[in-house]
Amino acid sequence: MKQPPGFSGRFTTSFAQYLAQLRLDVNPSTYVYTGPEAIERVLMTLGLHLQSSFEQPDPVLFGVNTLCARLTPEDNPEWVWVTPNQVAKGYVNDGEACPPDLLPLTQTLGLTFPELPEHALLLEASEDGEERMMAACRQAGLEITLLRELVDSAALFS
């Protein structure tokens, strides 16, 4: 019998053992800003140094309150995305029916990463835009840290 991808061949005998095997898979190029500046100020300052402005992308594609800045022309775009750590716990696309049990979640905030402060901002860039994003943060005095350095995947489930 063919085993599914990622199957190690080991089974657990308890839920605690199962949880101990879980590991958080974080994007290796996601950065976090936890400084005192509000998101509006960070977006304005970062946009100034990137020579771009942040806009709300298509919510159908992103769902959460992610803002993006285009760094290059449309034929080969480079992007920077900023997402607050605090987002709605549920989301329904505009024009779609909202199941009654989901409605309260769309009106309640939660943290994407509970280990981070609620005011933290997650910063990501397309492959070619990462250096520009990091340089703009340095120029703007925004201290950023790799997410994987702040989130200890082994400690999450112990």
Image (tube, rainbow, N blue to C red):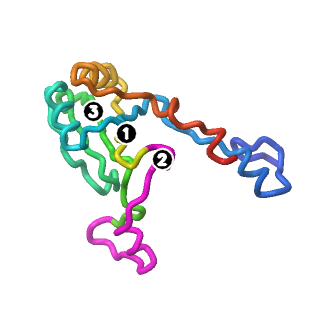
Q: Residue furthest right?
A: 13
Residue 25 location in percent, x, y?
57, 39
First in sequence: mark 1 vs mark 3: 3
Q: Where 155 sits versus 90, above or below? A: above
Amino acid type, mark 2: Phe
Does residue 26 appear to the left or right of 140 in the view shown? Answer: right
For disc 1, the marked residue is 122
Q: Tell me if residue 19 is in the magenta stretch.
A: no
Q: Residues within 10 Å of mark 1 (few under 14, many from 20)?
A: many
* Separation (CA) of disc 1 from disc 2: 10 Å
First in sequence: mark 2 vs mark 3: 3
Residue 134 location in percent, x, y?
31, 22
Q: Nearer the viewer, residue 72 or 76?
A: 72
* Separation (CA) of disc 1 from disc 3: 14 Å
Q: Which residues are magenta?
A: 93-116
* Separation (CA) of disc 2 from disc 3: 23 Å
- In this rendering, which labeled residue sits more in front, label 1 or label 3? 1
- In this rendering, which labeled residue sits more in front, label 2 or label 3? 2
For disc 3, the marked residue is 79
Q: Are marks 1 and 2 in contact (CB under 8 Å)?
A: yes
Amino acid type, mark 3: Trp
Which structural element holds mark 3?
strand
Q: Tell me if residue 95 is in the magenta stretch.
A: yes
First in sequence: mark 1 vs mark 2: 2
